[in-house]
Amino acid sequence: LHASAGKKQTRSSRKTEEVVETGNPSIADMTCDKLWWDDKVGGNGTVNVLVNALLEMEDKCNDLSPWRRHDTTRDEWRNQLSAASVAWTQDCSMQLGPSSEHEDEMTSASLRMSHATIVASIKGSLKDLELRVFEISGQKKAVEEADTAEEDGGAQSDDEDDADQKKRGQNWKIKINALNRVPTPKYTLIRDIIVAAITVARKAHLNQVAAELKAALQLHRPHAAGEAKVAAIAVLEKYGGYDASGDEEEDVDFDELAAVDAPAESPDNEADGAAITSMLCSEAIMMSGSIGGDDDADPYDWSDAIKECKSLSRLAALSQCFLSKAYDVVARIELERGELDSLLGVNAKRQSRSKKASNIKKSRDSSVAIWCDSKLTDRLVKAKVTNYPWWPARVCEPLDPLIAEGVKDCGHVVISSVGNPGMFLVPEKDVVDFIEETEDDLSLDAEVATSLRESTAIAKKLWRRQNVGVQSPWSRKSRPRFVEEKK
């Protein structure tokens, strides 16, 4: 369901790129005179450049979702970040000896912030801001839903065939077991197999396995893959090992094992293709773990990278990696908020709205993503958006009174699809209780069918957690069969 937003907004995507291009310049684009503090040449200093970029991003976040922390105020947070910049500027004064105006500073040098304190202060602010963008984007909510399902025994539905469950849990083992037959000098193949095993473990929602395999992968070095190989095999043994059949032992296709799809999959399904591995060192890969991460790094890697950062150069790299992603995310959210404002007739200053906008056209495409500052409720539903089947979702309550009034007046509901960050505005008539019967036997695109299964499985886990001791209404029903369209 969430993929539809990207497909439906080609023009919006171009606008997003334009917004990002006009944002703060990267550290790499700064001329040298700007990176060293000197008012004669207009230099602001590296720390000042970083701090200003983070403060600008915080302004954008606050415009989308006002400050709600209770442990500190917004002014205190911003002042602490600005103080680090001022302290660094004082230490960057270029002079041979103390001048009269600096004598007091030199006598109270112990009261100034040390280099380590300055870096630590900015690190804390960077971590806070990353979490804020993570929450605003909805990705934190999606990760927490998937983690909840994992805690309750994985994201497979209770009506899934035992054979399917076993197959999904064995795919990563097949790959790692094959490492026993790969010579250590073949360091590239070893890395590709471990990366593919991590990917299929994630697809099977085996997050702990994926995390341990990733730790093994970090031991991999060019022309030295022995430690990574041994560590990966140790993970396999920890989880019971793998008993391969005689045919599997005799006929091993290493190229297939290095691909994302496991050899045990149905031959009718086309392979996703070999995983594209990064040639960056582990320290550089970890920097891409902000705002939910990517295929190479996750939020845990980002947290580790923040903890290990002790130098200004590393801090600048971390900040720029975060900001480059954050500008894209915020620009997309601003466009999605603008879409909702337009539907509800909210004016440019977001202070009033046109009552004429209360009647939204029935022909409107409800699969176009929207965004509003909202509170996620525990109400599980199924929602029907344009060109998609009934989809598990949770109802959102807009926190802006203007938006809440507009949504109510037009007879619509704001929902967020389960397991995904996407938010949508759908008519009330297209929202039913999660356990209500709906027509599910539909021919679906293969990718949509897979996403729907995963979302439904997570939603069922959430429903059970909310209804402890209540028998699930679908436990004895036959599993709906989604027919995947052949392309």
Image: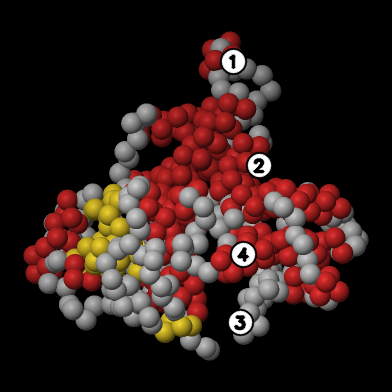
User: Which mark is drawn over residue 166?
Assistant: 4
Eye-nearest disc, 4 or 2: 4
**How far is mark 4 from mark 1, CA to CA?**
65 Å
Question: At 30% across and 66% down in the image, what residue appears?
Answer: 382
Question: At 30% across and 58% down in the image, what residue appears?
Answer: 380
In depth, the one of 174 and 58 nearer the eye is: 174
Q: Which residue is mark 3?
A: 269
| Label 2 residue SS | helix
Residue 104 spot, x, y in % from top left: 54, 12
Work out whether mark 3 precedes mark 1 in sequence or the reverse, and give the earlier one. Answer: 1
- Give, as a three-letter code, the residue at label 1: Ala
| Residue 407 visible in the picture | yes
Q: Spot the residue most to the top.
A: 107
Q: Spot the residue most to the left.
A: 355
Q: Which residue is mark 1?
A: 109
Say few, some or many: other residues with alpha carbon within 10 Å of mark 4 (under 14 / 14 to 19 / 20 or more). Answer: few
Work out whether mark 4 precedes mark 1 in sequence or the reverse, and give the earlier one. Answer: 1
| Residue 326 visible in the picture | no
**How far is mark 2 from mark 1, CA to CA?**
24 Å
**How far is mark 4 from mark 2, CA to CA?**
47 Å
Eye-nearest disc, 4 or 1: 4
- Give, as a three-letter code, the residue at label 4: Lys
Left or right, 437 with respect to 13, comes to left
Q: Which residue is mark 2?
A: 313
Question: At 25% across and 63% down in the image, what residue appears?
Answer: 433
- Give, as a three-letter code, the residue at label 2: Ser
